[in-house]
Image (cartoon, helix red, strand yellow):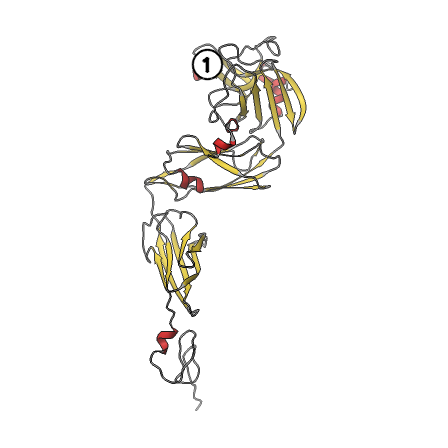
Amino acid sequence: MLLLLVTACGGGGDSDSDSGSGGNKNKGGDSSRTDTEVSQAAVTIAPEDGAGAVKTSGALKVTAAKGKLTEVTVEDTKGRPVAGKITGGGTSWTPAGHLAASTKYRVHAVAEDSEGRQAAEESAFTTLTPKNTFVGIFTPEDGSEVGVGMSFSVRFTRGITQPEDVEKAIRIKTEPAVDVRGHWFGNDRIDFRPEKYWKPGTKVTVNLNLDGVEGRPGVYGEQAKTVKFRIGRSQVSTVDVKTKKMVVRRDGKVIKTIPVTTGKPGYETWNGQMVITERLRVTRMNGETVGYGGEYDIKDVPDAMRLTTSGTFIHGNYWGGDAFGNYNASHGCIGLRDQRGGGDRGAPAAWFFDRSMIGDVVVVKNSNDRTVAPDNGLNGWNMPWEKWTA
């Protein structure tokens, strides 16, 4: 008969050998040897295993006593990792940011004691499901090509009272690399831009990691989105109110000079750097919408591009007669000669419209009005960099 000798895993054939993990195997039968081979390190994970409705910030922490953490892995059920770092000389680990809401996470942590012996712990918990949420409405759109003056702007559907946490959740990467900073306008809008206009060809990637970030007490973001856009060629056009001409520069070179008409006395055009944020082939302009009563209502304004939220446009004008280059006759907009209906694409306004894009810059100088407010449109370029980053 064939006899099979079965031994336990990790041990040799010697009946006095130890089955623990590591350490010297002592044949002397010392009753204390097992205790000395067990790691003295103790790992603690908060929240505890099985916890639910866990806060998305501040609740997750891993610590080690009588040893140092060597490995901490946190993943959701789809295998997406949570970034974090070991600090305090190996005594603790915290996540780099907030967690997503309504998500189950698994934690695996390993620590070593002074003898190099390992201790491990695992835990699983689920984050809270918020009753109140917010999202960010952003511009420009994903996949768009824009001009060198384009800021990345986010408007939130709820007022934000914890702006640092929200701003931290919006990360911007550029190729080539450039320093991009955010500036808050009130409690529901943040714009991001570099110190100077973007370099043509720059690729911008924005990670809106708002899911789970607490923007105000009890109100959490529910958005996780990546937005990419590209900076096109440079076009900066300068309107001189005194000479009533606009000089169009493409990549630094003058490509056209166009006669214009700007705001008449009492309705002067803003000074400053303004960015095109909307392009309308034909639109209606009614004085009622900008506080000018019934002074005008033109239902078919051609080739119109918005420069401010308050209603400043650069647009085609077919009713201006000989005003272009001669006198200022508008209610604050910049008018270029055009044909009714915009059918003549060689007309100055049509020519400019067809060669412009969202994010292009129009600079107005020598007006008797003040400089446009930085938050009136995407016109943060009128704020000094030192104040923008303060």
Number of numbered callouts drawn:
1
Can I make out residue 347 in this image? no
The one of 38 and 246 positioned closer to us in this rendering: 38
* Spot occupied by residue 222 in the image (x, y as percentages of width and height): 40, 41
Q: Residue at the location (42% across, 68% down)?
A: 114
**261 lies above or below 230:** above
Query: Picture coordinates of residue 278 (x, y %)?
Result: 52, 26
Judging by the rendered image, the residue that carries numbered circle 1 is 287
Residue 357 spot, x, y in % from top left:
58, 28
Q: Amino acid at mark 1?
A: Gly
Q: Residues within 10 Å of mark 1 (few under 14, many from 20)?
A: some
Using the image, determine if residue 368 lies above or below residue 187. Answer: above
Vertical relation: 217 (above or below) 272: below
Q: Is residue 90 left or right of residue 140?
A: left
Quadrant in the rendering for residue 125: bottom left
Of the pair 26 and 351, the residue shown nearer to us: 26
Looking at the image, residue 244 sits to the left or right of residue 52; the answer is right
